[in-house]
Image (cartoon, rainbow, N blue to C red):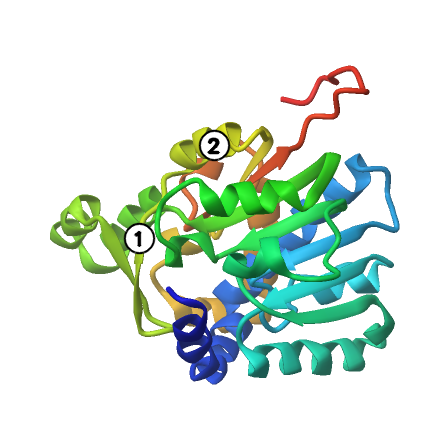
Amino acid sequence: MTHQSAADVFEDKLADWRAWAEAPWGQIRFAVVEETLRRQVAELGGGPLRILDVGGGDGRDAVPLAVAGHHVTIVDPAPGWLAEAQRRATEAGVTDRIETVSGSLDDLAATDGLASDFDLVLCHFVLHYRSPGPADLVRLAARVRPGGRVSVMAPNPEGRVVMALTRRGPAAALAELEADTMPSHAFDHTARKIDAEDMAAELASAGLRVVHRYGARIANDFLADDRLKQDATYFADLARLELALCDREPFLRMGGMWQLVAEKPDASVPRTGHP
């Protein structure tokens, strides 16, 4: 997408996104990521950290980090989404720890005043809307300090096959398996599929070393009856199960989305025992 078309597509779909994010499966996605990012913060020393959220939209990843005491800069091309992030920050009482910048991945290299030594850089659910190639990861890597980390997240092609099978049957699963693209229903847009292993190789080419892999919406996508998830007790059990599975093999490979966390090597520090 170009900068302008990205802003147009997402600006018009904020209400649809809000409905998705507040549904049980959206809540699970954000609960898992809040936990995985909490772990990164702990491994990076606890903070307070300086965090960059590229494509951070309405601040659903950023605001919990700000509540935890970190300073988060959100870069996003859609003004309405940045306004929503500011509203959420105001409600949480963390406007002093949330900064919003209008722009996209294309603008990272040229954005005046944006630091190049963030402790943690997030790029969640952005890359599958972008053209393939190394430039985006190079831009992200350039904004993180040595020893800092980059977290990327996207829909999991393998998980989509499982979801198609459980909800629409084997013919739909076969069609999903063979497709190179996927629809984004919330944004009425077609996106490319990105395999986690391919992304790990691309991160390595950008000079980053994968230290963690997580899965999200693992149990949720095996459960085709979404009505059950509206029950508070059932949903609480489901959310606990998702957190228990997010870092466990082989379950993490089955989820509806994957998350990779990669570290920028620090030549001045001996390599530790990260996986």
Residue 153: percent from left, percent from top: 51, 49
In the rendered image, residue 214, in percent from the top left (x then y), is placed at 55, 40
Label 1 sits on what residue type?
Arg
The answer to whether 130 is drawn above or below residue 142 in the figure is below
Q: Tell me which residue sits at (52%, 78%) in the image.
A: 18
In which image quadrant can residue 202 be found? top left
- Is residue 259 in sight in this rendering? no
Q: Secondary structure at mark 2?
A: helix
Q: Residues within 10 Å of mark 1 (few under 14, many from 20)?
A: some
Against 31, residue 35 (above or below) is: above
| Residue of label 2 | 200
Q: Which residue carries the number 1 mark?
A: 192
Tell which circle, 1 or 2, labels the residue nearer the N-terminal end.
Answer: 1
Image quadrant assignment for residue 220: bottom left
Q: Is residue 37 visible?
A: yes
Please state, as top left, top right, bottom left or bottom right, where the N terminus lies in the image. bottom left
Q: Could you tell me which residue is drawn at 62 percent across and 51 percent down?
A: 122
Q: Nearer the viewer, residue 83 or 228?
A: 83
- On screen, residue 187 versus residue 79, left or right, reads left
